[in-house]
Image (cartoon, rainbow, N blue to C red):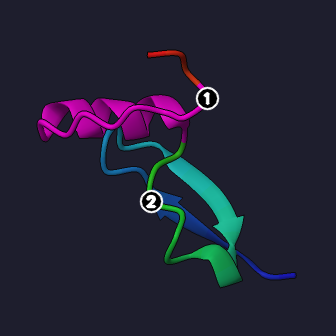
């Protein structure tokens, strides 16, 4: 299994992902993902959260 280092576009921290998941792993945490979506005006509701 090969790993690569990436940089989170939301917070700038480095994180490690599997090389075969390189294209899908963009953010280091779910917090950074939700922060990015809020900043871009996207309002995505999780199916796990009650409305």
Question: Which segment is the magenta one?
Answer: 29-48
Q: Is residue 40 above or below residue 18?
A: above
The N terminus, quarter of image: bottom right
Reading the image, the residue beneath label 2 is 26
The residue nearer to you, when weighing 18 against 45, is: 45
- Tell me the number on the disc at residue 48: 1
Would residue 33 appear left or right of 4 to someone viewing this image? left
Q: Position of residue 41 (x, y in %)?
A: 12, 36
Q: Secondary structure at mark 1?
A: loop
Question: Toward the viewer: 6 or 25?
Answer: 25
Looking at the rendered image, the disc whose residue lies closer to the viewer, 2 or 1, is 1
Give how far across and how far down residue 32 sits, in percent.
41, 35
- The Cα–Cα distance between marks 2 and 1, rounded to whole angstroms, is 21 Å
Q: Residue at x 33, y 37 (%)?
A: 44
Q: Is residue 39 covered in magenta?
A: yes
Residue 33: assigned label: none
Residue 3 in percent (x, y) is at 73, 74
Quarter of image, res 26: bottom left
Image height of 5 relative to 47, above or below: below
Q: Residue at the spot x=31%, y=41% of the render?
A: 10
Give the position of the C terminus as an image quadrant.
top left
* Residue 21 in the image: above or below residue 8: below
Name the residue located 54 percent from the left edge and 35 percent from the top edge: 47
Residue 43 on the magenta span = yes
Disc 2 element: loop
Task: Say left or right for 49 vs 10.
Answer: right
In percent of width and height, residue 20 lies at 68, 83
Q: Is residue 3 above or below residue 32?
A: below
């Amino acid at each position: 299994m090969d790993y690569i280092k990436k940089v989170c576009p939301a917070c700038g921290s480095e994180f490690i992902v599997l090389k075969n998941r390189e294209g899908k792993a963009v953010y280091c945490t779910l917090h950074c993902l939700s922060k990015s979506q809020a900043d871009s005006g996207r309002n995505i509701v999780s199916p796990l959260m009650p409305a």
